[in-house]
Structure formats: structure tokens, C-alpha cells
Image (cartoon, rainbow, N blue to C red):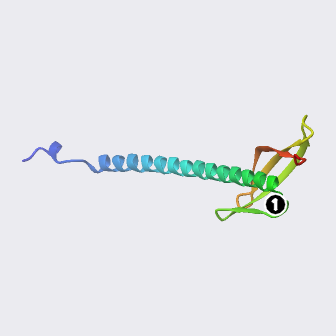
């Protein structure tokens, strides 16, 4: 008769191996989902920054519509601006707050300066 210790894995050993594989797969999937969510957040922040920079350029050119949503890459953003004076009477500071309308997420910290008078 053959020795049974060389016959291979027992059923219990195979089940334990499957449980370990399943648990590691679940943790890998959770890490992947967290990574995708972080990348989506970075993408939204970058688009908000582009929207703010575009609004500053529109303000410099005198083309900005204050209440119209801005559309970038199919996403809509609402941009709120707050103006404040600076020590230079020919400049004013503009603080922009950008809201992603699809995700209802608000981004702040965008600012620029705008000439209040045109130099002659």
C-alpha cells in the first residue's frame, strides 16, 4: 500500500488556501477602489483649477458671465467670486470658489489680481 501522506492536499488545507486567497482578493479590491476615488478627486480638483484660471482670464478680457455655469470636459462648475481692494489702488484681489455641480463639492483657494483701471 502507498503512503497516504504523499497523496496531496486534504480538503481542509484546500479550503484554508481558498479563504486566504479570497481575503487577499477583497483587500486588494478595496485598495484599488480607494485609489480610483483618490484619482477622481484629483481630477475634479484639477478641473476646478482650470475653471478658476479660465474665469480669471475672462475677467481680464471683460468676457465673464457671472451666473453662467462653466463647462469643462462635460462637467459643470459654478464659480463664485469675491473682490477685495489691495494696497495698490489700480489692483483688486479676486478670490474664487469653484463648485462641481455634479459632485456637489466645493473647492477654494483660487485667487488672482485684476486691474481696476486701464493704463494710458
Residue behind mark 1: 63
Q: Residue at x 48, y 51 (%)?
A: 29
| Along the line of sight, the residue nearer the viewer: 30 or 4 | 30
- Residue 20 appears left or right of 106: left
| Along the line of sight, the residue nearer the viewer: 67 or 103 | 67
Q: Residue furthest front?
A: 120
Residue 103: quarter of image: bottom right
Q: Residue at x 48, y 46 (%)?
A: 27
Residue 18: percent from left, percent from top: 36, 50
- Residue 114 appears left or right of 72: right
Q: Residue furthest top?
A: 87
Q: Residue at x 52, y 49 (%)?
A: 30
| Along the line of sight, the residue nearer the viewer: 66 or 90 | 90
Residue 55: percent from left, percent from top: 77, 54
Element type at marker 1? loop
Q: Residue furthest left?
A: 1
- Residue 25 appears left or right of 114: left
Q: Which class describes the residues within 10 Å of circle 1: few (<14), some (14-19), or many (20+)? A: few
Residue 90: percent from left, percent from top: 90, 41
| Along the line of sight, the residue nearer the viewer: 44 or 63 | 63
Residue 116: percent from left, percent from top: 90, 47
Residue 108 vs 64, above or below: the answer is: above
How many marks overall?
1
Amino acid at each position: 500500500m502507498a503512503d497516504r501522506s504523499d497523496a496531496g492536499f486534504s480538503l481542509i488545507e484546500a479550503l484554508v488556501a481558498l479563504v486566504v486567497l479570497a481575503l487577499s482578493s477583497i483587500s486588494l479590491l478595496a485598495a484599488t477602489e480607494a485609489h480610483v476615488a483618490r484619482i477622481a478627486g484629483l481630477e475634479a480638483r484639477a478641473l476646478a483649477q482650470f475653471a478658476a484660471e479660465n474665469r480669471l482670464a475672462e475677467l481680464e478680457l471683460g468676457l465673464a458671465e457671472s451666473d453662467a455655469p462653466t463647462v469643462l470636459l462635460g462637467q459643470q462648475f459654478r464659480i463664485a467670486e469675491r473682490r477685495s481692494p489691495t494696497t495698490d489702488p489700480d489692483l483688486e484681489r479676486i478670490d474664487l470658489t469653484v463648485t462641481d455641480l455634479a459632485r456637489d463639492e466645493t473647492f477654494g483657494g483660487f485667487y488672482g489680481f485684476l486691474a481696476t483701471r486701464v493704463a494710458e
